[in-house]
Amino acid sequence: MTEILRVAVIGAGRMGADHIQRLHTRIHGAEVAAVVDVDFARAQAAVAGIPGAVALSDAEDALTNGDVNAVLIATPGFLHEEILHSALAKGLPILCEKPMTPDAASAWRIVEAESALGKLCIQVGFMRRFDAEYAALGAVIRSGELGELLMLHHQHRNPDTPPGFTNDMLINDSVVHEFDAIRFFTGEEITSVQVRMGKASRHSANGQHDPQHVLIETESGILADVEIFVNAQFGYEVAAQATFEEGIVSIGADTGLHTRTAGRWGGTVTPGFVERFAQAYDIEVQAWVDATRRGELGGPSAWDGYATAACCEAGVEAQKNGQKVAVQLAKRPALYC
Ligand code: ISE
């Protein structure tokens, strides 16, 4: 397909609204054709100032709209499965925000449907793969210049959580990014997950135990750990340190202005993920558009969506039983090999 992508954005909340502006102002080769939100007023507000874009309240209306030839799904994860099946049935290219679906069984149904189609249509929105520092660390690992990768240490800190952010969302909504990053860095599947609960912050929202320490193993025995701390108060921080046979590489330090004035020195902490990964989102969406127009896939696939869902399932079980839980994966279908 070399034609311009006429994109239906499903969901005009925080990420949806961000992607709509991105598609409208910064992405080449794509336009916003429709915005869908159950809150019709929100859809209308999102298309204001975008010529030719229609506001709708039903996803199916957008997918059958003759003016639409691609879909970006940015609704909450539990709503993705139905839209994905419908868009796949119409053979539309899809960029689906993470998590692809909320559990491994529904993710597997998507993998099966795409396999039956015999064509890679779904890119999953793991934007960290497009972050300059994540990409650079991935290149160091693959080059072997520091020897073998032995361990990964991740810190994932959010200032606070929106209402309704439950304890399992620390895994399903947040650590899902580290599951993908670890698979991306190592090129291996994750084999087990354990979650340790230590002293909880008094800022933990109702029902959460925050922070948590997540211990992960990969196929070759690489160990990774994640401090997930979603009510850290001070700001947003996503950082990692990789231990190699012959060196250490760290990424994710805030590197804005370092100012000395009035007897103080310092800078500002990034407030949230929209700001921290703004460039990565731009590169991710442009990669999706460019690859789709070439008839290719531009990033993580539905298999990655499924494999990370299986890790999340193990992680949520591990939150409850404190044990090391094995990740159960079905055989990878030929389409993803
Ligand atoms: C959020 O949904 C994201 O995807 C962010 O990248 C992550 O840092 C945050 O924890 C999630 O809630």
Image (cartoon, helix red, strand yellow):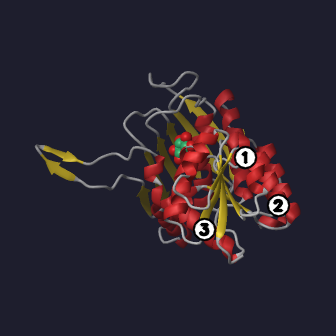
Kind of residue at disc 1: His
Please tell me which residue lies in front, 7 or 244: 7
Residue 217 rendering spot, x and y as whole percentages: 63, 48
Q: Secondary structure at mark 3?
A: strand
Q: Which mark is residue 1?
A: none
Identified at 82% across, 61% down, the residue is: 90
The quarter in which the N terminus is drawn is: bottom right
Query: Is residue 277 shown left or right of residue 173?
Result: left
Kind of residue at disc 2: Lys
Q: Which residue is mark 2?
A: 90
Q: Secondary structure at mark 2?
A: loop
Kind of residue at disc 3: Ala
Q: Quadrant of residue 295?
A: bottom right
Please tell me which residue lies in front, 147 or 172: 172
Q: Is mark 1 within 8 Å of ligand 1?
A: no
Q: Is residue 241 above or below residue 290?
A: above
Residues at marks 1 and 3 touching, judged by CB atoms closer than 8 Å: no
Q: Which comes sooner in the sequence, label 1 or label 2?
A: 1
Cα distance between the residues tagged 3 and 2: 19 Å
Query: Is residue 73 shown left or right of residue 141?
Result: right
Cα distance between the residues tagged 1 and 3: 22 Å
Residue 253 rendering spot, x and y as whole percentages: 37, 52
Identified at 85% across, 56% down, the residue is: 113
Residues at marks 1 and 2 touching, judged by CB atoms closer than 8 Å: no
Q: Which residue is mark 1?
A: 80
